[in-house]
Amino acid sequence: MLVAINEYGQSISLLDHYDVRTLRELRNTQNFFCPICKKEVQLKIGQKKVSHFSHYQLAECTIDHEAETETHLTGKQQLFTWLKQQYEITKLEPYLKSIAQRPDILIEKNDKAIAIEFQCSRLSDSSFQKRTLSYLDSQITPIWMINASHLKQVSTYQFTMSPFIWQFLTKFNHQYPTIIYYSPQKQSFYQLSSIIPFSPTLSFGQLNETKLNDISLDVLLYRKSHTAFQHFQYLWIQQKVQFRLHFSIYPQKNQRRLLLALYQNRMSPSLIPAEAGLPCPTMYWIHTSSCIWQLWIIIDSLLNLKIGEIVGFKTVYRAFCNRVRTKDIIVRTLPLVTSNSHVSFAVMEYLQMLCKVNILEKVSKTDFRKRSNFTIPVNDSQSFEVDRKVINLLTRKTN
């Protein structure tokens, strides 16, 4: 940590530009204590590394905090300096007694408090959610940034994302949700936006890099950045081909009920409808592969409808929720997506996508009429062609 209390009750911040000589004098003449647990801490002085306070090896602090790596200390120092230039009230490592939390940085903007957390190490889901909800319950807006070493880019528009990374997805007002990475080494932000997951681990999106001193916090949080699906639609189709192959040859244990449902409807796993696996803007709520959760909607609510029959959104969503309860579909907990978004949006968007590819037509705000049958390939060689045609049609209707 960069802030401690001396024996006189004074707050000592190591960002107050102490030189090495002064720090050594302080260490020799004063004792320092953790502002939270009040236990004695040691002042570690670095010439190449960041000077900081740390608990003694066997000491246990009462607050859950991240181990102070060099990367974390450097990043916190850089972000604090950057924010202090923008906001008059900027506090480093303040202890918020009412919620027993110590954010890396706290700023006050228009009488509103904003907590900045720069996370470098892994954090359990429960700890992340507990800390986030404690901020929100206290009317403090949490902004989590993650070390850029966790960014895993496969290609220009493809990224692998673990459940740990998905926790950082943040939605500000009506903007598209983003994940903010920060690199202390490059002093750059990497903002991942327009995120559309294909599978539990593979997502498509747009990555923007911006130097720390070339952007303000407001612009970083609220700038509009959206990439049209057409930029990566061919890659999406390729993933669909791979899904068909692996789903038919290497099905997972938790997909047995789905395989049985396909068998009962006389469908081969490799010949699922081309309309399963369509990109929906808010399906970031759903951990399960896009092909699978949409296939469940088709089987449960749409496949056996006759042409001209009407189905309501409530009926479809109720069946979707039943699949969530039986764990055939897994949804994500996203504590930082707090405005104008819900998993039900993804279900409605999928029905709207089916309208664009001429399977359904909307007859009221929440009712849909079946217009045509689903496109089911007759053999493996035809599957790529029908997938391509459906995605191309969707892209034309969306633009």
Image: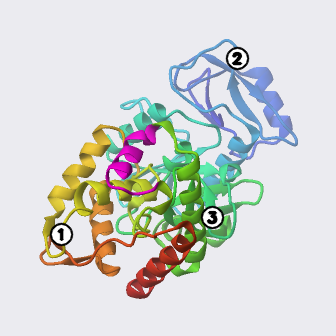
Q: Position of residue 387 (x, y in %)?
A: 49, 73
Which residue position holds label 3?
158
Instruction: Please give left or right for residue 359 compared with residue 207 in the image.
Output: left
What residue is shown at x 47% (from left), y 77% (from top)? 391
**Quadrant of residue 293 within the rendered picture:** bottom left
Looking at the image, is mark 3 or mark 2 earlier in the sequence? Answer: 2
Which region is colored magenta? 254-268
Quadrant where the N terminus is found in the figure: top right
Q: Which mark is residue 56?
A: 2
**Does the rendering let one see residue 241?**
yes
**Above or below for 209 versus 64:** below
Q: Position of residue 121 (x, y in %)?
A: 64, 38
The residues tagged by marks 3 and 1 sit, at their Cα atoms, a distance apart of 38 Å
> Taken as a whole, is the magenta stretch helix, strand or loop?
helix
Which residue position holds label 1?
306
What residue is shown at x 66% (from left), y 37% (from top)? 2
